[in-house]
Image (spheres, helix red, strand yellow):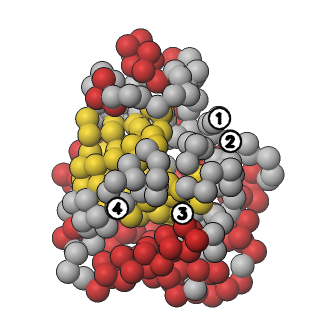
Amino acid sequence: MEAYQTLYDTQGYVLIPPSVLLPTSSPLFQDLLTASAHVVAKTRSGAWSHRRTVGKQFPPFDSDNPDSWGVQHVMHPDLGEDALVFQRWYTGEEVRRVVCALMRCRDEDLQMELFNLLINPESHEFALRWHRDDVREDATTEEEEKALGIWTHGVQWNTALYEDDCLYVVPGSHKVPRTPEQRVHSSSPDPPKDPLAMPGSIKVTLQPGETVFYNSNIVHCGTYTHTRPRATLHACIGSTQGGASRARNILQHGLAWMEDSQAFREGLSEQGRAMLDRTIGMKRGVGEGVGFSQTN
């Protein structure tokens, strides 16, 4: 894993092949593909209301647009057997091993955070602006430096179930403030017409089963087309070594159900319950009213 660690530390992202995390020939890949199809169908029909709506780039999401670009809370017990499939993978040994290696932490430091599904809208083209997940677009250079300095205790990832070329990143930007030229492309609420016009940007293309792990404060954006199927597992895990540094970015998505649901706890593995307890501890420590990382 050392080579992956080095790339992640240097670039702010790293590609992990299917053979390491999710072989497409494995029963688990097929289970995740089936579970994803089920929850997407529930979301599109209105049976599952926790979704990312076209027209809203960041939380809080609303129901103003019937079209969706994401499914929220896929481990929620109300999703039945499908939730158990997602839980099994998210808390499984393979994911935890990679996450611990990239964050250079112990298994007993891991805290449960978010697990969602990124999907293609049915009838709209949609995009996210250039952003860092927990740093606003109008942050000063000094504010960026401070925020980037503490954002090392969590890792986010996308695992593609179909070919996926929706993510764009600026390698190395997880360590340094934006240049004046980069600010020109990332200080507006509007998504880019051409993501590759951002200085230093690249497109990340994933094959089925392939995963990109990335520091979520890397400068990045995403594009969503209705013309190609997309079902990409989108998740993050944090480390208790970061204290409350990740609280706002995680709790803004509304995770009270994780603490309140006995059915959720009972469905988790022993390792999953330990991860959940650490997250509940963080939530109780910061209290209510953490606010939102971005504005729509």
Closer to the chain start, of discs 3 and 4, is 3
Q: Nearer the viewer, mark 2 or mark 3?
A: 3
Mark 4: which amino acid? Pro
Q: CA distance from mark 2 to mark 3?
A: 19 Å
Q: Is residue 71 visible?
A: yes
Asked which quadrant contains residue 147, the reply is top right
Mark 1: which amino acid? Thr
Q: CA distance from mark 3 to mark 4?
A: 14 Å
Q: CA distance from mark 4 to mark 1?
A: 28 Å
Q: Which residue is mark 1?
A: 295
Q: Which residue is mark 3?
A: 71
Tell whether label 2 touches label 1 (CB within 8 Å). Answer: yes
Q: Which residue is mark 4?
A: 229
Mark 2, secondary structure of its residue? loop
Mark 1, secondary structure of its residue? loop
**Relative side of 122 to 287, left or right:** left
